[in-house]
Amino acid sequence: MTEHFDVAIIGAGIYGLMTAHRLLKLGVKKVAVFEMNYIGSGQSSRNAGGIRAQFANPHTIKFMVAAENEWRGMTKELGYNILFTQDGYLFSCYDDEDQELYALHRKLQNENGVKSVWLEPDAVRELVPGINQQGLVGANFHSLDGILHHDAVISGLIFSIRRNGGKIYEYTPVRKVEIGADGKALLHTPNGTFHAEYVVNATAAYAPDIASGLGISLPIKPVRRELIVTEPLQFFMKPMLVSLKYGITIHQSLRGEFIGHSSVSEPENFDLKASFAFMVKYARDITRLLPFMKNVRIVRQWAGTYDMTPDNSPVLGPAPKIPNFINAAGSSGHGFMMAPAVGKFIAEYITTGRVNELMRPFSLERFERGEPLTELVLSHRGVL
Amino acid sequence: MALVGEYRKNQFARYDSMTVVEFIYNGRSMRAEEGITVAEALRSNGIRLGGRSMRLRIWRDEYHPFKEVPSAWVSIDGIANINAYRVRLKGGMKVASQTRRSLLALIGRYSGTGFYYKNFTRFELTRNFFFERVKKINDYGGPLEPGKSSPGSVRELEFEPSEEFSPDVLIVGAGRAGIAALMALNLPGGSSVIVVDSLSKEMIEDNFRQLMLDIKGEPFSSQLSSLADSDTLDGLLKKMNATLLHGTTVFGAFEGGQYTAVRGYSRILLIKPSAVILCTGSEEIKPVFPKNDIPGVITSRTLLSMPPGLLQGRKLPALCLETPLSMNYLSRISAVVRPTRIFLSFEADEAYAAGLSSVFGVARADIMPGRPSAAHGAYNVETVTISPAGGGTKQFPTDLLVLAGRKQPRSELVLLLSLNSRMDADNCMPVPAVNDGMLCGGDVYACGSLVYQDSTRSIASAIVAAESVSIRLGMKGRGELTPALNAAMTKRSGFRQLQPGQPGGKSVVCPCLDVTLDDMSRLYSEGYETINRMRRFSGLFMGPCQGARCYRNVFEAYLSISEKQLDLPTVRPPIVPVYLGALALTDIQIEEEAK
């Protein structure tokens, strides 16, 4: 079985599917997505669905603004409700934290097109009833950040890709990618070898394995991350609440469940087992931040794999010297937020050959050039 | 008003109290005998159970495939999500159905499939619609007031610090099987045992009495060492140096063999035993692949539990290894069936392939990589289709395909958690096969499931499990089926089949979220083709029971609508809901990440 494709995308996660969707929309005919497991089996169906632009690096902020704009039109574009609500991200600030840093963040964000504001404690209380008020100084808040339903996005993308003639091969791991003498790519899978003009490597933490066959070394490591979900309460908390002090996030889904995430020291591997330490750490922290939560029960805990890079930002764009091998991996926990812009820019590159200005800073060469996208002040590691 | 009188005469009658007390149900005063379960008390007052499906507008048990397991979530004295079949009635109790005014907005009332369905597929319906619905339906304490410390009327609870135990043996479940396992243990002096069950002490004493009735006159009762001189549960516990933790539910098993349980709602228990016997009953432990649902395909566990000689007519059996199992385990398979071909779903090294070849006496050329893929219609009694690495597909004739691998029993909740926490491939070895519900490995021993009224099987397998643990801890025991136990085991009753086509197609597959058989087939036809995708869309496995009640229904329903391979989701802790407040008081060290 030797099939020929214009674009072969490895990995049916959010990056891969979004790129396929955008390519088909631009009129590229033969697009195939290869997935080693079931569609969306990785982090794309394990994340909390938060979308934010409150970052602390000019390039990342601009990219996120573009992505947020794309998300806004996604329900219409897919013909499928992705349950995207823009109720803001709220970064709570307590008196033992450095308020200067919050101000610096706002300044940087405002300069780059994100209208984040400072909220006084009264306003914070209104948005998050039940928040611990002892020592609460205020919060950074950006009302255009939001939450969507990741499973809805994946479902919508699958239907859109199939409707437009794209192919998705499930349970078809790509073992090796080669570039032939004619410059075209060969993808070896247990179900046969496939030819493609362009290859997109959207395999998250598996991306280094795929790239190493072509002599490219990607600085991406897998790290386990865990989330919990509680029983549902009446919907009352609209924004995503982030506490950098405790390193936790929490938001309430439309079903009323609270979904939360915390940073515990986790092993660097693909282990997806749940750990008791995480459960206890989260419980300790969240009951300090939202005291009423102690009366609420956890119903489930699950784990996913972050694909971390040294500067917590993805590697996007064509590989050095191999213009038809494109990396889109290493999203370090905010892949979902960036996805529509990633899909758009990569599709744009494949159809026109231009690398978008917003995507250029995310190239692999940034590490060699010594221009990592490090955050200005606060590490956002551990915050979804 | 009819008291339980009539009802008590039937098979469930296990309590002698005749004290009649008053209790409140949804604001109405009712009377029933003290000490019967809340569900029984409600039934005697004409209330069939404590739950009603908002979505389907029916009593939940009416169309439930397993009438014995209705979804009876009620709130008692203000605490929600309590199973009415697990709590005994006391005077003055305030019981409320969760379909009316409850304190918490509960899963399944307006959400579930119905909510997802409407909102996912019609994008103009947005949250405004949802808010309207919530406001109308969910009257749980009025609007939130700014500055109020807790939203709505979430009830304030008191929690206690955690406790630690390290017994020699942990028995999970104190039903008839659990108590039989305790009786059959033969441990070195000074050993300690912990028995954990979510029921109250009185109900466990009922189980003890019931066990005594069940085993009276059974030939195998002589194998219960402590039977002769303990006529009360307390006597038995004292004799065995055992602690009974009643009202305690195991909710997780983690790496390193640590079990976590919650006592009442308020205290977390950390238990680190040397060996575990799981007697968690029919809801939690069941074989995932029922024997006859896919003709010609059998799992290794079922295979090992079959009487010898049953497979003698098979000429071309094939074995599919899904994970690398130990040679020890494989040699047990080879004693029952000799495959002519072996397919490996993983990459085996040379030494492993050599081992396989010698264990089964199969030529090396007949051991090949390749996974029978569902897309090619693989599981079929005449041929098995394999896609080898070089491309293309190959077909091999077969008349029996044996599936072996540790991934199979994915939804056997407690059991699977236990195995995950303890096992690696090398100590994956079952103790002597007892029945198809039994699984063992390493330090974890599980007894057979109590399927409806079929108690002797589970008691017999519990005895074998307990004896195996005794042997492991250096004491005597047979740890295998004696003729008497074997005779008990052959009395088997079949599983009840899911019956599609109830009026309106409303057979409830998932009792927590009211997902019906019709919903599943509709999802399937709309492109949600695997269980994992259906789950993400409909919420299957995501209710308060976390799959304990629904996985088997889901599995059977899926087989009835699809030819595809099953992909049941991973089981994860907590398998019962646990309060964050109790977890927060757990005394363990946590390595926090540098901020």
Image (cartoon, rainbow, N blue to C red):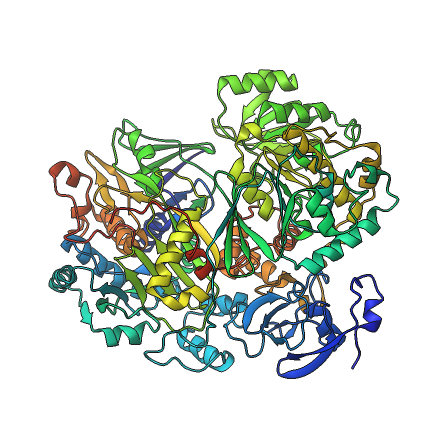
Residue B146 position, x and y percent, is: 33, 79
Is A125 located above or below residue A28 in the figure?
Answer: below
The quadrant in which the C terminus of chain A is found is bottom left
Is B188 located above or below residue A240 in the figure?
Answer: above
Report the front residue among A180 and A224: A224
Determine the residue positioned at 19% across, 49% down: A359
Horizontally, residue B302 falls left or right of residue B94, namely right
Report the front residue among B45 and B273: B273
Does any portion of residue B339 appear in the rendered image? no
Determine the residue positioned at 33% across, 59% down: A249
- Quarter location, residue B185: top right
Determine the residue positioned at 56% across, 67% down: B81
Is A383 located above or below residue A241 in the figure?
Answer: above
Residue B262 position, x and y percent, is: 53, 55
Residue B163 position, x and y percent, is: 50, 51
Does any portion of residue A95 appear in the rendered image? yes
Horizontally, residue B595 falls left or right of residue B247, namely left
